[in-house]
Image: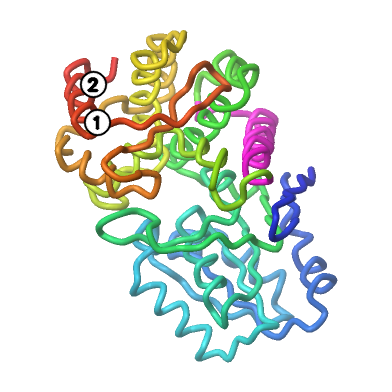
């Protein structure tokens, strides 16, 4: 097990990462919360079938309450948020209670937002079950979706700890592996050129990743995330660089309907688009053809889905949290490891999207 300390302005906590770390959660709860009254596990219907018993059995003597949300982005609606709060109230949780988030990024976002708003804030712990959650479980961004925009209703609210048991990742389907690994690629591109070269050299098939490769890649990703969130907890500056690829990705997710494309696969398309813009606007020296060939070999789609309207994508990007006035702010790269924020007008954005579609992302 490796312990990674995440220092932020509001709270310092540890990410425990490795195989079998879930075995330590009972002792952690007892030692850190001497007056613990109730435990609410929030998970989703897919994770519950596979992993819920592994956690609930370890905590049987503490009699945890369980709330099961729908799978994927359907967990992040006002209705589900309300139902989770109702479960907490009906079971008499109080300020000495704790929420355990068992699942991927959507469950973590929902659980953290419930924790942040119930009685003005109670503790919660992230227990990720996906590769994608190596990013979302660290840093304290919690939110639910609105039909007009992803993650538009939320808070910055740090967990008490993150228990990242890699044994829980062995059941992931191929699409979820791709989704999570896109964020690993993102972390390398914005911060660590050597890590990016390691990925291209060593990762040729996401279905045959070794335990050692996965542990190394996820640990590196968490440490990159720490570099940004420890210096800028509430995204007033450099933390925005973590949104590389996300401005277009969020628009694609909203346009297609949440859950109809995985978050990471949309981010991968967004990164290719941002790399293209970086070459055009900033003179980025980068072999984009090699990158596209590599990610296609890993199974990624590289084009914006045909049913997505460019005009509507631009409208959705202008509603993004990172937009200011009539200018959409994109994270671009001056070079690998050197991100910058660049404002782009909606007219230029529409033209570049049309060109991107014509080239098929190549």
State whether residue 20 appears in this view. Answer: no
Position of 351 with respect to 45 (left or right) is: left
Q: Secondary structure at mark 1?
A: loop
Q: Residue at x 54, y 16 (%)?
A: 200
Query: Which percent across, then down, holds residue 56?
Result: 64, 71
Q: In this figure, which residue is indicated by the disc labeled 1?
A: 304
Residue corresponding to mark 2: 356
Q: Is residue 198 above or below residue 319?
A: above
Camera sees residue 299: yes
The location of residue 293, given as percent across then percent down, is: 39, 13
Q: Residues within 10 Å of mark 2 (few under 14, many from 20)?
A: some
Residue 228 in magenta stretch: yes
Residue at 85% across, 71% down: 31
Name the residue rendered at 41%, 73% in the picture: 81
* Magenta region: 206-230
Q: How far is the residue under mark 1 from the one under mark 2?
A: 9 Å
Asked whether the beta carbons under mark 1 and mark 2 sit within 8 Å of each other, the answer is yes
Q: Main secondary structure of the magenta part?
A: helix
SS at badge 2: helix
């Amino acid at each position: 097990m490796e312990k990674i300390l995440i220092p932020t302005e509001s709270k310092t906590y540890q990410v425990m990462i490795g195989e079998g770390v879930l075995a330590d959660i009972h002792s952690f709860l007892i030692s850190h919360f001497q007056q613990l009254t109730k435990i609410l596990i929030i998970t989703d219907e897919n994770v519950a079938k596979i992993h819920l018993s592994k956690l609930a059995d370890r905590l049987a003597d503490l009699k945890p309450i369980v709330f099961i949300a729908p799978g994927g982005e359907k967990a992040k609606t006002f209705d589900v948020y309300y139902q989770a709060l109702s479960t907490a109230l009906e079971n008499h949780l109080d300020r000495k209670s704790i929420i355990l988030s068992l699942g991927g990024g959507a469950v973590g976002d929902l659980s953290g937002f419930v924790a942040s708003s119930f009685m003005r804030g109670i503790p919660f712990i992230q227990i990720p079950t996906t590769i994608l959650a190596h990013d979302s479980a660290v840093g304290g961004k919690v939110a639910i979706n609105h039909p007009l925009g992803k993650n538009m209703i939320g808070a910055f609210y740090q967990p008490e700890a993150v228990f990242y048991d890699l044994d829980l990742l062995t059941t992931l389907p191929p699409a979820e592996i791709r989704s999570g690994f896109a964020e690993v690629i993102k972390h390398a591109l914005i911060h660590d050129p050597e890590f990016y070269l390691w990925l291209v050299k060593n990762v040729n098939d996401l279905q045959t990743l070794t335990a050692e490769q996965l542990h190394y890649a996820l640990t590196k990703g968490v440490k990159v995330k720490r570099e940004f969130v420890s210096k800028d907890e509430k995204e007033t500056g450099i933390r925005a660089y973590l949104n590389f690829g996300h401005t277009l990705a969020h628009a694609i997710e909203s346009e297609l309907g949440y859950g109809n494309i995985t978050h990471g696969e949309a981010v991968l398309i967004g990164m290719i688009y941002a790399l293209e813009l970086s070459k055009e606007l900033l003179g980025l020296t980068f072999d984009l053809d090699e990158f596209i060939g590599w990610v296609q070999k890993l199974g990624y789609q590289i084009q914006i889905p045909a049913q997505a309207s460019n005009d509507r994508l631009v409208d959705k990007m202008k509603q993004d949290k990172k937009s200011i006035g009539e200018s959409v702010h994109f994270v671009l790269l001056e070079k690998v490891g050197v991100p910058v924020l660049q404002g782009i007008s909606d007219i230029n954005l529409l033209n570049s999207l049309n060109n991107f579609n014509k080239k098929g992302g190549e």
